[in-house]
Each structure stands twice: as structure tokens, then as C-alpha cells.
Amino acid sequence: MRLRNVKGSREKIEGSAFVIQEPKEYRGKWNAVFKNDNPIHIEIGMGKGQFISTLASQNPDINYIGIEKFSSVLVRAIEKQDELQLPNLFLIRMDAEELEEVFAEGEVTRIYLNFSDPWPKDRHAKRRLTSRQFFARYDKVLKEDGRVIFKTDNRILFDFSLEEVVEAGWILENHTFDLHNSEYVEGNVMTEYEEKFSSLGTPINRLVAYREK
């Protein structure tokens, strides 16, 4: 369970050189932030940052932006980035509903969603990051050949997500109900949650979705 209050977290975020304080000011200009024209990949709900920092270290020719809503979680990612000092990784504290206000049309190449909040009550379905409402937001910011990659241990949420991909007019490139025993495991980077769940034998679900333009 995520901690919502960590003493001094807001001050640490405001003082970090790796956190973009006013992200809406950079809409359409993110490559200027990175000082190159490399593709931009984002992770929504990055948690403590293990996944995205690993990708950034492995792929110096890709720019990464980690998005996290909760200050108390974001500070853990800041601490990791303070150690690594990766030039191709920046962080944002924001709500994913503001995605279109922060990224311009076609500015993002890939979106990662890892172990997102399932919002189990039906009345909260539109808040799920794999709802058709969020796929409509992704459609606006992704390049034409962009991809959304989603992982979760929650089978109910995954089944919902498979349906929403179709309802949103997207196409499933591939999916699996047991990532670590599938052909898609090669090159997989695990999150903190994934390490925990997979060590307990919990199957990890994964899908990749795109849309035709």
C-alpha cells in the first residue's frame, strides 16, 4: 500500500533538478528539455522508479519521463535518480488526467502502465488507466506508430483492459496471462511490485496495444 505522507517530500520535489515543476509549459517542447530529438517514452504511475530508471540506463538514445501522482512515492524515485544522474530521465508529479495538457499531439512514442490502481468499484471504471477514456487521451499524445504496454497481476483488471482496448478502437498486438512463462519475457524489465508478485508465483499479465491511423 502506498504511503501518502512523507515528511519533507514536497520540499524535496520542489528542490530536485530532475523534477519538472511546471510541465505544462513544455507541451510540444520536450525534446528541448532533453536537448535532443530522441523518442520520448513515458511511464504513468512509476512508483519508486525502478522500472523507468532501468530502461533509461539501458537505452541512452531514448528520453524517459516518469509520472507519479503521489509526492511520498515520487521522492523515492528522486532518490534513485540522485544516485544514477541519468541525463535522459526526468520526473513529473501530476495526475494522468492532465496528459493532453502536458504533451502535444504525437509527442510520445511509448506509454508504459505498470501495476496500475485497479479502482475495483464499477462506478470508478473510467479512472482506470486502461479505460476507454484514458485510451482516448493516449490517442492524442502518441505518435501514429506508438504503443501502450500494460502489466498487472490483477486478472480482473486485465480482462477489463482487454475489452477496453477493443471498445476504444485499438488493436491488440499481443497479450499474455503469464508473462514470465511466455515468449514475451525476453528483455522484460521488472518493477518492484513485479519482483514481489512473481517471486510468490503470481502470474503477470501483459498486453501491447496500438491503433491504425
Image (tube, grey):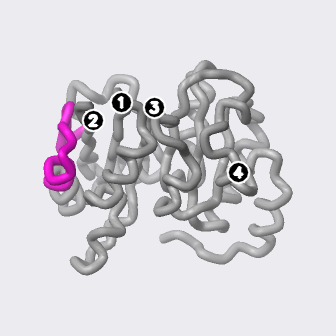
Q: Inspect the image, locate mark 1, and give the three-letter code of the amino acid beneath it.
A: Glu
Q: Residues within 10 Å of mark 2 (few under 14, many from 20)?
A: many
Residue 210, numbered label? 2
Identify which residue, 86 or 210, lies in the foreground. 210
Residue sitting farthest toward the top: 61
Q: Which residue is mark 1?
A: 144
User: Mark 4 vs mark 2: which is more N-terminal?
Assistant: 4
Mark in front: 3 vs 4: 4
Three-letter amino acid code of the residue under disc 2: Tyr
Residue that mark 4 sits on: 25
Q: The residue tagged with tag 4: helix, strand or loop? A: helix
Q: Nearer the viewer, mark 4 or mark 2?
A: 4
Amino acid at circle 4: Glu
The quadrant of the image that shows the C terminus is top left
- In magenta, the rendered stretch is 163-180
Residues under numbered marks 3 and 2 in contact, where contact means CB atoms less than 8 Å apart: no
Q: Earlier in the sequence, mark 4 or mark 1?
A: 4
**Mark pair 3, 1: CA separation:** 8 Å
Q: How many numbered markers are drawn?
A: 4
Whole-number angstrom distance, CA of label 3 to CA of label 4: 20 Å
Q: CA distance from mark 2 to mark 1?
A: 9 Å
Q: Is residue 174 magenta?
A: yes
Q: Earlier in the sequence, mark 3 or mark 2?
A: 3
Contact, mark 3 vs mark 4 (Cβ under 8 Å): no
Tell me: residue 213, above or below residue 10.
above
Could you tell me which secondary element the residue under label 2 belongs to?
strand
Badges 2 and 1: C-beta atoms under 8 Å apart?
A: no
Assess disc 1: are there few (<14), some (14-19) or many (≥20) residues with their C-alpha within 10 Å of its C-alpha. Answer: some
Q: Which residue is mark 3?
A: 109
Instruction: Residue 183 in the image: state x and y as whole percent.
Output: 22, 25
Q: Is residue 23 above or below residue 179?
A: below
